[in-house]
Image: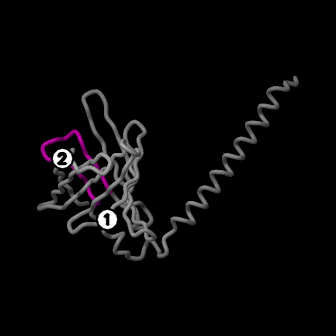
C-alpha cells in the first residue's frame, strides 16, 4: 500500500466535517422538535387545527386545466395541511409545496411556502368568517413591501382569493384576484 499524505489528511478532514454536520443536524432537529411539539396529541381534536380543513381537497381554476393543487393532512394527525400545486405548460411543468399549520403560542396560522426557483416565504395569518387572511413583508425602509393574501369561501365549492401589496405604510393595492373550485376528497 502506498502512503499518500494529502489523501489521508483530506480523509480525516472530510470525516470531521461530516461528524460536525451530523451533530449540528441532530441538535437542530431535537431543538426544533422540542419547540414545535404541541401540548396535546395530534389525534385529539383541536378547533384551531380543525379550521385548516378549509384547505383540504383538490383546487382547480374553472375553465383551465393547466393548474391543480392537492391539499391533504400530513400523516399521523390533523395538525398540518400539505398542499402541492402543479402548473403545466407546453414545454415544461412546475411544482411547489405549502404547509399550513397553527402555532398555539402566538395563536396564529402559519403558511410555509416553497416556490418555484427556490423562493421560500413564511406568512402569518388569522381565520376570518369564511376563510383565512395571511400576511408577510420583505425589505426595509423605502423598499419595504407588505403582502396580504385573503381566501374566502363562496357558494358550491368556490373560493375567491385576493392578493394585495403595499409599499412601506402605503395603501393596499389589489394585484391579483382568482376564483378556485375546491373539490373535497
Dot placed on the residue nearer the N-terminal end, 2 or 1: 2
Eyeballing the image, is 179 above or below 41? above
Which residue range is magenta in the image? 55-71
* Residue drawn at 82 percent across, 31 percent down: 8
Q: Is residue 137 left or right of residue 55?
A: right
Q: Which residue is mark 1?
A: 126
* Residue drawn at 54 percent across, 65 percent down: 35
Q: Quadrant of the C terminus?
A: bottom left
Q: Residue 115 location, x and y as percent?
A: 37, 43
* Gap between marks 2 and 1 measured at Cα: 24 Å
Q: Is residue 156 left or right of residue 97?
A: left
Q: Which mark is residue 61?
A: 2
Q: Is residue 57 magenta?
A: yes
Eyeballing the image, is 115 above or below 51? above
Task: For label 2, count other residues whose C-alpha is less than 10 Å away and answer few (under 14), some (14-19) or many (20+).
Answer: some
Residue 63 position by quadrant: top left
* Residue drawn at 22 percent across, 39 percent down: 66
Residue 143 position by quadrant: top left
Q: Which mark is residue 1?
A: none
Q: Quadrant of the N terminus?
A: top right
The one of 167 and 46 positioned closer to us in this rendering: 167
Amino acid at each position: 500500500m502506498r502512503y499518500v499524505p494529502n489523501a489521508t489528511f483530506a480523509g480525516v478532514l472530510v470525516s470531521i466535517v461530516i461528524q460536525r454536520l451530523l451533530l449540528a443536524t441532530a441538535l437542530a432537529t431535537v431543538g426544533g422538535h422540542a419547540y414545535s411539539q404541541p401540548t396535546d396529541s395530534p389525534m385529539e381534536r383541536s378547533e384551531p387545527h380543525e379550521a385548516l380543513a378549509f384547505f383540504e381537497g383538490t383546487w382547480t381554476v374553472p375553465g383551465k386545466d393547466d393548474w391543480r393543487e392537492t391539499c391533504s393532512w400530513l400523516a399521523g394527525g390533523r395538525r398540518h395541511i400539505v398542499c402541492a400545486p402543479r402548473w403545466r405548460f407546453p414545454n415544461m411543468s412546475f411544482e411547489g409545496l405549502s404547509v399550513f399549520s397553527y402555532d398555539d403560542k402566538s395563536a396564529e396560522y402559519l403558511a410555509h411556502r416553497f416556490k418555484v426557483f427556490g423562493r421560500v416565504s413564511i406568512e402569518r395569518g388569522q381565520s376570518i368568517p369564511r376563510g383565512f387572511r395571511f400576511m408577510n413583508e420583505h425589505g426595509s425602509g423605502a423598499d419595504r413591501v407588505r403582502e396580504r393574501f385573503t381566501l374566502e369561501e363562496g357558494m358550491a365549492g368556490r373560493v375567491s382569493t385576493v392578493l394585495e401589496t403595499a409599499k412601506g405604510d402605503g395603501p393596499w393595492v389589489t394585484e391579483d384576484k382568482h376564483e378556485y373550485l375546491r373539490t373535497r376528497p
